[in-house]
Amino acid sequence: MSATDGASTMPGLASPASSTLRSGGGGALLAQRLGLSIRMKLALAFGSVLTLTLVAGGVGWASLDIVGRSLRQIVDGSLPAITASQRLTASSGQIAAAAPSLMSAASESALRTEFGALAEKQRAVTALIKTLQERRAADPAAVQAVAAVADRVMTELNGLNAAVEQKLRTEAARLAQLKGLEEAHGTFLKLLAPGIDEGNFALVTDGETALQKTNKGLSGLMEGGVATLRGVLEIQVAGTTIAAQLIEAANAPGADRANVTRDPIIAASTAASKTFETLPQSDELAALRKSYDAIVALGTGAASVYSLPFARPDASLADLQAVQRTRYAFVERIHAAQQSFAAKAIALVDGANFDLVLAGEDLAKQNQGTVSGLIERGIAGLRSLLELQAEGNLLAGLIREAATTEQIDRLVPMRERIEAGLVHMEISLAAVADRAVADNLGKQTAVFTALVDADAKDNVLALRERELRARSLAQASLGRNRTLAEEFDAAVVKVVADVERNAETGGAGAEARIDQGMLGLIAIMAVSVVICLLVGWFVVVRNIALRLGVLTRSMRDIAAGDLEAKIPVAGRDEITAMAHALEVFRDTAREVLSANARPPTSRPSPPRPTSCRPRSAKSVGK
């Protein structure tokens, strides 16, 4: 091919190559200016992809680590705190319900059991509060408020426990004193019974003797004055016994205890009714019968003592006081009826005694020694024993009333009545002729005196007063416990809400961190894809493959004889070295063609054909 032909075809080949190289863009030109080898370019390209892969893995690891920390925070912090708060709610309710249980304890052992269980619950609450403080799953101020209220609740429950314990202890001592009263009263009546029977027998025997001596006069005395006096005294004893039983029924804590008094009242009433029928009728006896019937009526009928209401176990303090006022008013009615009856009975006894004395004086003129002995030994002794029996029954009833009263302010007048009854008993005891019987009765009377001795610390009235004061303190403490329980519950609810809110916040934070990690991974993946495309396009396609293609076309053109073909030589890499080697080959071919075109004389020897063969890029580099 001629040079002219090669020159004519050269623009067509050179223009695409040069335009292609110019369109390589900033990436290819920058790589060419830096003088990087193809190995370095490919290493940088794949290194950037590897770097992005490592960055994506790091972001994924960091995201998973953040999620793991969030889950550990929920598992190690929120879940135990939620469990602790729920258990705290249950324990707070149990502690709030402990006050009524303490208040209703029936014995000291039951109280100790209840309080021991309460102490265990308090320790559990303290542990739960400590757990919430350590986990910091709620507002520290709110948790501290719960701890403060819990301490106040426990302090108040300790006070309630002490008050209930004092009440139970004094109640047990009071009941023991009442048991002693029952035993002493029973012994007292047993000691009186033989004396009364013996007095009756002696009186009948002496009366028979006197009757034999005085005939009709003494017979009239026995049937009239003595029988009347004895009958009135027996009625007095029966009325006093009924009054004492009514007082006991009015102060009974329940219907079962009140019903125990029915049989003694019926027995005394039956005996007194028979005695009334044997006595000669008079206005004074009719008045006594009316007073006696008034006492009996208080134990029978629709408005009797047995129809009085009893306080329910769950009654409020106001209802309890209303029931107590009703019963106290009825007790006052009993006392008024008994006093009216006693006044009429004493008047009759005094009248009968006076009549008996007058009759005795008349008979004494006839048989002074016999009648005088009858009056002094038989009648006076029998009267003192019967009066002593009546006073003992009344005194036992008064002590029972004082031991079961529900109002402290009633203890003072009750003590005065009891002391008056003791004085009457001493007077009657002094009139007993049989000193052995009097001594035994005096020992039992001393038991009554000891039960109400003002100088004794544990007398019945003092025990009842301490019991009522302790119960009042317990009632007040129970009211304060209800208020503290509501405050405790409100504080616990606030802490529980705070724990749940913090747990929800932690869960939301974990979800947000997971979302952030996912977005970071997606962003890294997108950047990786873009950079891989850019590296493939700018480094591999445009900077290497495109230049190799252009150089390959230049080599084909030169091999076809176009020695004017443009050869791209931009850059400093292996492709540039190949381009330089191709330029040397082309220039050599041009020189050969120029030499062949000269005259033969001056033309040097042509080179060997093999010298026109292009050298490899490797040899050119050398």
Image (cartoon, grey):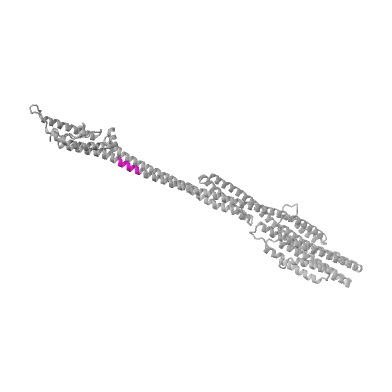
Q: Where is residue 36 in the image (x, y as percent from the top left)?
A: 28, 34
| Residue occupying the point 28% across, 33% down | 33
Q: Is residue 362 shown to the viewer in this render? A: yes
Q: Is residue 128 magenta?
A: no
Q: In this view, does 262 lie to the left or right of 562?
A: right
Seen from this angle, which residue lies furthest left?
Answer: 601
| Residue occupying the point 61% across, 55% down | 100
Q: Is residue 373 left or right of residue 109?
A: right
Q: In this view, does 509 lie to the left or right of 548?
A: right
Q: Where is residue 402 in the image (x, y as percent from the top left)?
A: 73, 57
The answer to whether 151 is drawn above or below residue 44 in the figure is below
Q: Position of residue 217 (x, y in %)?
A: 89, 71
Front-most of 178 and 259?
259
Residue range of the region highlighted in magenta in the rendering: 525-534
Q: Is residue 238 left or right of residue 617?
A: right
The answer to whether 458 is drawn above or below residue 523 in the figure is below
